[in-house]
Image: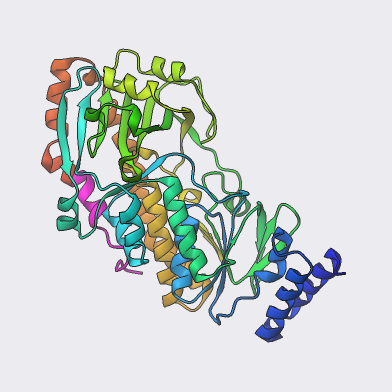
Amino acid sequence: MCSRRYNISLFRVVISNRKSLPRRFLFQIGLVNQLCGQGSNPRAHEVNALSGTNAKHHILIAGGGIGGLSAGLALLKRGFDVDIFEQAAKLKGFGAGVQLSPNGTRVLFELGLSDELNNIACQPKGKEIRLWNTGQTWNLFDLGAESVARFGFPYVMIHRGDLHNILAEAVRREKPGAIHLNAVCAGCTQDERWVTLNLADGTQVTGDALVGADGVHSKIRQTLFGEDHPKFSGCLAWRGVIPADRLPAHLLRNVGTNWIGPGSHVIHYPLRRGELMNFVGIVERDDWQVESWTEQGTIEECARDFSGWHEDVHRLIRNLGTPYKWALMVREPMKRWTVGKISLLGDACHPTLPMLAQGGVMAIEDGYMLARCFESYDVVETALARYEAARSERTRKIVEGSATNARRFHNPTLAQQETATKYISEEFTEERIQDRYNWLFEYDVTKAAI
């Protein structure tokens, strides 16, 4: 019977002699692992992660979220060997919506996912502004067919879990064993030959490059650059998902709605073929500073935060299943996020406030750009340096633009009807809307300079 120690010693042989060992031998060691019953255990990664069959770089990705999966898929489609290490026991997205503007759907379509997206996502006809207390409505911009005509790709709204499933299934079609669960990142090291990803259970995995896509609390970022020091934005965000059959018809229109008011705003839009309604409410308060997507609140507390708001907003709140709350933190854009053979991606290097709805899309763009750079530059360090250079200015601009939008949505002049009407009519003109959003939607990461 094979022992765990024997398995690890075999792994060490592979590590020390990797360049000289034939791939058949690497595969046979991986097979020994499976025969020893290690196939579903994270320690099996020690050998199996080295058993790819492609001669291109072997790239490790820490984090199996939207960014990590997008990067993995883009790399696999270009012939790179990829292993993705996710701390969760089950791969699933949190119960919330995500907006994918044309610059993001462009990438997903390029990756061959158009049918999957069209089957489950919603393509809203447009976005609108509503005033917090009266419900007065202004058109923000048209989407639907207009988005395709102007930008070449649709603007879609999708449940985060549905997007995770689409990406994970696509990754597994390219490489069935690419995603490793229960794999908690503890840190990383590198030398002149390769990088080592250290997992919390003692497992060590080597590869030619490592990408930290492990989110806002990134362990890879911490290892490279030390602890970060986020500042509280002064805002708390509520989120939840509402079954559509709980809501009246006028709240189920196929549009994205942004309620704005003094010190707060609310966004809601349909998900999953219109079967669900996503709810996000952001309010200025300073008594909650926990940065977590899993902290539960109560319907009563959420309703108090929007006291005096229109009945439509309160109807949404009353019908939330479980409301979650998290503190919105601000981090200055990183001046550098690559060190040698290790780089960062998505929220690990440029977390943003949600006021431009570009957080998920930035991670998708990152993943595609990363793959393009690896395809264009043979040297790992050069590829990662070019990736960072290609992404740093755009992501910085989005982070700063999101903070500006927060002030715009919460302007104190919105408190009174007369000043609110004047403010909205001036601040949300077609020209200003285009200045604010067109540069986002027109961007083409498949052709941007690298």
**Image coords of residue 236 (percent x, y):** 44, 27
- Can residue 17 be seen here? The reply is yes
Quadrant of the frame with the C terminus: bottom left
Please give the name of the residue rendered at 29% of the width and 49% of the height, measured from the top-left corner: 156
Q: Residue at x 40, y 71 (%)?
A: 372
Toward the top, the furthest residue is: 308
**Number of marks drawn:** 0
**x and y, in percent, of residue 3 in the image:** 86, 66
Residue 178 occupies quadrant? bottom right
Q: Is residue 360 above or below residue 244?
A: below
Q: Is residue 425 left or right of residue 103?
A: left
Q: Is residue 345 visible?
A: no
Range shown magenta: 435-450
Asked whether 173 falls inside the magenta stretch, the response is no
Q: x%, y% of residue 204? A: 71, 62
The answer to whether residue 261 is above or below residue 400 is: above
Residue 311 vs residue 172: left or right? left
Colouring chosen for the image of the structure: rainbow
Whether residue 448 is in magenta: the answer is yes
Place residue 258 in its image quadrant: top left
What residue is at 39 percent from the left and 24 percent from the top?
319
For the view shown, which residue lies furthest in the front direction?
245
The quarter in which the N terminus is drawn is bottom right
Taking depth in this image into account, of 416 and 54 the one nearest to the observer is 54
Query: x, y percentage for residue 274?
Result: 30, 41
Q: Is residue 354 left or right of residue 440?
A: right
